[in-house]
Amino acid sequence: MGARTDTPSLHATFYMFLHVIFVVSSSEASELEALLKLKASLHPNDALISWNGSTPPCSEHNVNWVGVNCGKGKVKGLRLENMGLNGFIDVDLLALLSNLRTISFMKNNFDGPLPDLKKLSALRSVYLSNNNFSGEIPYDAFSGMLRLKKVHLAHNQFAGSIPTSLITLPNLLELRLEDNHFDGQIPDFQQKSLSAFNVSGNELEGPIPKSLSGMDSSCFSGNLELCGKPMGNCDEGSIPSILVIVILATMATIGIGIVVFINHKRQPSLLTKAPVQPSNLQKKSGIKESNESGQDSINRSGNTKKVENVKLTFVREDRERFDMQELLKASAEILGSGSFGSSYKAALHNGQVMVVKRFKQMNNLGKEEFQEHMSKLGKLRHPNLLPLVAYYYRKEEKLLAFDYVPKANLAVHLHVHEALGQPSLDWPTRLKIVKGIAKSLQYMCNALPNLIAPHGHLKSSNVLLNESFDPLLTDYGLIPLINQEDARDIMVVYKSPEYLQQARQGK
């Protein structure tokens, strides 16, 4: 009777034992699988030859895989340093390692943005120094990582502000950010635990927080605009900077005035000359608003001249509509004049900002053919092409409206910044730009197979850069629209001797 009573207890113990074995085995299997997938995303991975499915990364008393730190049979850290690695650090895979506390990928060849580390909220140490990581780090990149003690991001290509989420880490001991391109002011780090701090070799400015005044001056060297203890006094150090700013601002104002004056003198009217009025697109470009009835309008000389109805044609459905009257009344500024005509920045009342380009040499196609080609350009969808939004057709001149991109074009970054002594584009960013341009050209070759050259006017000033330094091509696909003689003279495109001999220009 007693034996029968003990049977359920024995069964329960046996099933519990099986459950524990299964859970442990499952945990080990998930760690092994996650690390093998991580290995596959890294290259070259010859140094990780010990990472294979025949042996788990950790056993009870041994470490079986190179670069893995273990504790109680679990993966506690990864130390993959100086292995020539690049590729993609998959944070989602690392998140499967529930006991992971330290990661180090120092002295490798990783590039691109900072991995999304906040998914690894239990980390205590992050070592990513001496790589080619670049771009701005989001302000909340370290949010919720309350156990994080050591952050090493030195000797990379990071830019922008130092992420403010770093000041929310209560246990921060070490922060190494030297030799990057961080700018702006240093956040106020109040952690009393902070013992190692270095932001030298960046582009930081302004006063050093009092909480960091006890650090050695070498921790801040190479930032010419920093002031305060342990560097020079802010009042003394800021006088030369203010003087330089005043001089540069004065020179820039004079230069802009000259450019605007010259453009104004050269600028012909589009429909009729506009009278003197507030600085809007109508005044800047010379476009005169027509009345709805198509009646005669009177120009400044008193002559009566028939003005056609002005109507915009939209080629995209994902943009908020506006009419020509709104565009003409928008506050505007001249962006520049090129081979084809002038460009204007127009700020609409609804907050939209557009770039309006006025083209003069576009008489190669009739109205229907022109509209058909505009429709084709409006259907192009690629992240590296500045989208055409709308156009206006008139026999003598045409207007094309595009989205406004606030950052400068590639020519400014390559030539003007260098001439002014400003930081030039680093090589990872240049490679990123080249790749984006190549991808967009390949896309246009497939989307516009009838064009001799998909762009036809590719030059550095026609490559805009957004906030992430992604290239956006503009003035593309215009070869069929341009007069043949004008195209030969002004289009920046290679022309073979055979092409010149046959004088083939157009579709």
Image (cartoon, rainbow, N blue to C red):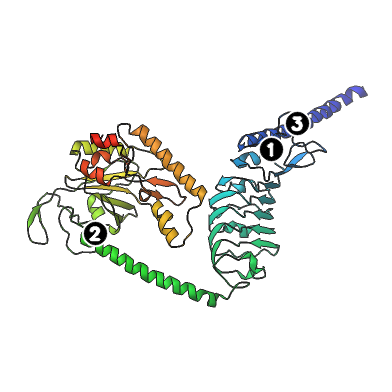
Picture layout, residue 163 above or below residue 86: below
Q: In which quarter of the image is the C terminus?
A: top left
Instruction: Determine crowd level at label 3: few under 14, some 14-19, many 20+ residues with C-alpha closer than 10 A.
Output: few
Whether pointer 3 and pointer 1 mark residues with C-beta atoms closer than 8 Å, the reply is no
Picture layout, residue 361 above or below residue 506: below
Instruction: Determine crowd level at label 2: few under 14, some 14-19, many 20+ residues with C-alpha closer than 10 A.
Output: many
Disc count in the image?
Answer: 3
The residue at the point 34 percent across, 46 percent down is 474
Determine whether the residue tagged by mark 1 lies in a helix, strand or loop. Answer: helix
Q: In which quarter of the image is residue 185?
A: bottom right
At label 3, the amino acid type is Thr
Q: Which of 474 and 83 is in front in this view?
A: 83
In-image side of 271 versus 237 (left or right): left
Between the C-alphas of marks 1 and 2, the distance is 63 Å
Q: Which of 294 and 404 is in front in this view?
A: 404
Who comes first in sequence, dot 3 or dot 1? 1
Q: Which of 8 and 357 is in front in this view?
A: 357
The residue identified by callout 1 is 47
**Residue 189 image position (x, y, % from top left):** 63, 64
At label 1, the amino acid type is Ala
Determine whether the residue tagged by mark 2 lies in a helix, strand or loop. Answer: helix
Whether pointer 2 and pointer 3 mark residues with C-beta atoms closer than 8 Å, the reply is no
The residue identified by callout 3 is 55
* Residue found farthest to the left: 303
The residue identified by callout 2 is 284
